[in-house]
Amino acid sequence: MKCTIFSFFAVLALQVSAAAVVDRGVSHQLEARTCSNPTSAIPVYRAFNAQHSDHFYTTNLAEFQTVVNGGTYISEGAPFKIFSTPGFDTVPFYRLYNPELYDHFYTTNAAERDFAVNTLNYVYESVIGHVYPNTNCGGIPLHRLYNVQLSDHVYTTTAQEVEYAKANGWNYEGVAAYIIPA
């Protein structure tokens, strides 16, 4: 009888121990899958149209080359990276355009996107990629600024550009997203 009870508890202890190992393994696998791999991020190209004071961002190299080669935009490089496909830890980065203001506008907030379309005459163009919604995965802030006189939004990762823009009439609107540095 003692042997049977001992055997029962020994088997039970092994099962609980094995279950704990499996649970830790699953938990570890889930933790490992929560952050998209930064090496899979793609460049975001930035161009500027001085005639209409419009900053334009795209992940599509052909689209970027078309606007730059068309002569109305100048290249400002590829200042940051985002993901081309959605991940467990990412959100869409929406692109909108207001043809009356010649302004491209980018947001992760669907309600803000809808408000801009329904109230501010922006046209929804596309999701240009996917970004982190917070710093949990190591992304850095992408700051959004707006200049009322120029009717232009600009997005930057550098504190120097934020401070320069603020000193020159741009209003700081907060962090638009968290991205991968270039």
Image: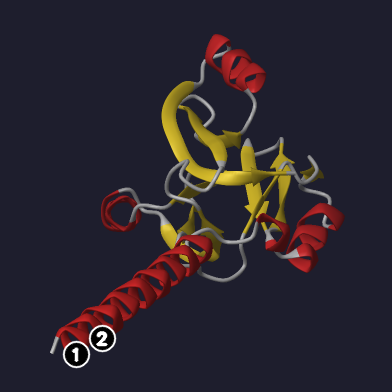
Q: What is the number of the mark on residue 7?
A: 2
Q: Is residue 21 above or below residue 110?
A: below
Instruction: Say if mark 2 contacts mark 1, CB within 8 Å.
Output: yes
Instruction: Answer with left or right where residue 61 lies relative to residue 150.
Output: right
Position of residue 141 measured from the top left corner of the image (x, y, whole percent)? 53, 35
Q: Is residue 146 above or below residue 26?
A: above
Which residue is pictured at 41% across the width and 53% down the height?
108
Q: Quick check: can you spot residue 135?
A: yes
Element under disc 1: helix
Q: Where is residue 26, by image quadrant?
A: bottom left
Which residue is pictured at 35% across the width and 55% down the height?
113
Q: In which quarter of the image is the C terminus?
A: top right
Position of residue 130 measured from the top left corner of the image (x, y, whole percent)? 53, 61
Instruction: Answer with left or right where residue 108 lies relative to residue 162.
Output: left
* 156 or 32: nearer the viewer: 32
* Residue furthest front in the image: 2
Element under disc 2: helix
Q: Quick check: can you spot residue 153?
A: no
Q: What residue type is labelled 1?
A: Thr
Which residue is pictured at 62% across the width and 41% down the height?
54
Q: What is the number of the mark on residue 4?
A: 1
Sort mark 1 into few (<14), some (14-19) or many (20+) by Cα contacts within 10 Å: few
Position of residue 41 measured from the top left corner of the image (x, y, whole percent)? 68, 59
Q: In this view, does 151 lie above or below 3?
A: above
